[in-house]
Image (tube, rainbow, N blue to C red):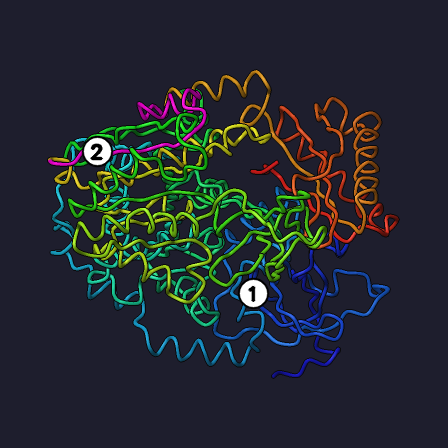
Amino acid sequence: MPDNSPLDMSWILSVWIQSPRHANLSDALSYSWKDALPLGQLVRVPMGARHVLGIVVNSTPRAELDADLGYKIKPILSVFEGLDPLSSNWVSLVEFAANYYQRSMGEMALAALPPQMRSLSDEQIHKKLQKWQRQRSTPQTIVQSAHTQEENLQPWSSRSLSAEQQQVLESIASGTGPFLLFGQTGSGKTEVYLQAIESVLKKNPLAQVLIMVPEINLTPQLMARVKERFEKHLGEHSLVCQHSGMTPAQRLNAWLAAHQGQASIVLGTRMSIFMSLPRLAMIVVDEEHDASYKQQEGSRYSARDLAIYRARLVGAKVLLGSATPSLESWFQSEPSGKYQRLYMNQKIGGAAHAKVIRVDMNHQPRNTIVSAPLLQAIKARVQRQEQSILLLNRRGYAPIIQCNSCGWMTQCLHCSAYKVFHKLDKSLRCHHCGHTSRVPAACPVCADQDLGMLGLGTQKIEEHLAQLLKPFEEELGRPIRVQRVDADSTKTKDSLELQLQAFHAGEVDILVGTQMIAKGHDFRRVSLVAAIDPDSGLFSSDFRAPERLFALLMQAGGRAGRDWQLQEHSSPELWIQTKHPKHKIFSALKTFDYEQFAKDELAERALANMPPFSAQALIRAEGKTQEGAQLFLLAIRACAMELLSQDESCAGCEVFAYSVVPMALRKLANMERAQMLLESPSRSQLQHVLGKLQAPMQELRKKHKDIVRWAVDVDPQQL
């Protein structure tokens, strides 16, 4: 390491480090160094007794500052040698995200880097980088070997396109976007993505493309298609994944490949929006409506919305795709909006939509789980060696165990929620805080042993279905294979991928699972999908609940009949077991008319002045008592009212602060939680007021000792 004595420290550098907004540190801390360093340079700096990773954002000659700064400036410990600085566009993306989502710059920036980057020393990173470079070809080598003039004249795929697909690709090629691809399930959206990516990479062999999916379980199938199409042309190491299910070493290697320009295509979940991609030319956001694109902890950013901003920042094209677009994106793609809407209404091969069959559970015997007509339909599919999916968005065996004498229920001691009974290990488990206990032999209140179960989960459906089909197995002469896929059955490494592979291979007759199996998967032998108990989403206090339920059911219905040849002898069906068969959601679903549903929902939101016709932010507080959390938020509300009435810069801002209320899940892991909603017809006015509130909130936090943490959630997806 070079001599870093104070006499050599002729530059003062501003450095981002990882510190949350509530830590009340400035966005950039000052350190000294013998030379100026470029914007985005990674360094190691002292922070108290620790040595932490930092990002240089400014260099100033010491001579330009006052000779006596009034405090001692510590020197930078080391500079990451051999690693290119992060680009100015990446720094700008972080600055925008931090300002918009009310976080500190360092918190947003450092959280976006691989965990190993923060824990390994610069020497270790340097050795890893050298080893990585030896094992991989340079982009120039790949370009020379894969992108010959003769090859560029030929398409990389021989797949024929439908007229709709061709028209969409021509619109993407000639337009600037952003594009919203409204494509029915099974209409070939993925092929459009791949063809659009091929066009970009042929035009500029050094370009980079980011493909985002909402959940980890969607990456294996899509990555297989991406590799099949591009690996032989781009090279083995030019396609990488980035998601939280990867090991720290895998994530670092993928990041290095993208940052150094080796990776041409990156496929990832929401975290990948912050990947360092110096030559980014296109972003594809698949299933753009999915709420999983919104981070629910920490920085609480929306990867979909940041994709729009990042594409505009670097001049890249961005393509949002969904069969059920979010109402925000749909509104933005109206004639007066900012997006260009592209249509794909026809399924490949002329396949038809699934026929929607509503079963009125009011007319079924009490405690019926799988109705007789649905059971017969499933049996018919099994006989024809076709597959069925049963959807229930609740894992476990039974949501509640109750005493039939005194009414005691399995309340979690640490949360305002009930523990769910899991039959496989005979445990009661809180799905919020994770606390687990054994099932009591008798009621802990009245000692009665007559304990009953309320509700049902995927484990119970799996067991009940196996019992119902047992007599049919003897008639069929073979076992009927039922498989459950949910968060409990996919805990071990690669378990989800193996289970889905078995279903794709036809080794499973019936798949029982939660929403994780209802979207994005291309199941070729499925001809029946059934929603067992969707009614819980019909009467939620959250105004987005109807949109989420409609999207879930329409996406689920899209899993049936994806093989048009299968429809020649078996029409696809979507079964809905409900006690409210005439509800407007099910009526709209019967014709798969998303456009009419969106029109009706937007009309209701316009009347109520809800998003996308207004902007919202939630301020949440967690404390030792509910009273303490609410008092803290009431003090913030008073500050907001004072700003709006007395601060000249806030004069005329139409920002309304709703009453302070407990959160829907009032208590979580022994923390009492409350929230306050801010709403404005102007996004910029809401942002201005939130920025003005930061300093008062920091001061109020010091006075309210009951408060453990607080956070601002801009554009919340759950109220």
At label 1, which amino acid type do we have?
Answer: Gln
Nearer the observer, 294 or 652: 294
- The image position of residue 439, as x and y in percent, is 59, 59
441, above or below 195, in the image: below
Q: Verify whether residue 583 appears in magenta.
A: yes
483, above or below 686, in the image: below
Q: Is 650 displayed left or right of 359 in the figure? A: right
- The image position of residue 459, as x and y in percent, is 43, 52
| Crowd around label 2: few <14 · some 14–19 · many ≥20 (10 Å) | many
Q: Give the magenta-colored segment's residue range.
A: 569-594
For label 2, the residue is 347
- The image position of residue 321, as x and y in percent, is 35, 38
The numbered dot on residue 277 is none
Q: Is 633 displayed left or right of 300 in the figure? A: right
For label 1, the residue is 41
Tell me which corner region of the image, top left, top right, bottom left or bottom right, holds residue 664: top right
Q: Is 486 displayed left or right of 379 in the figure? A: right
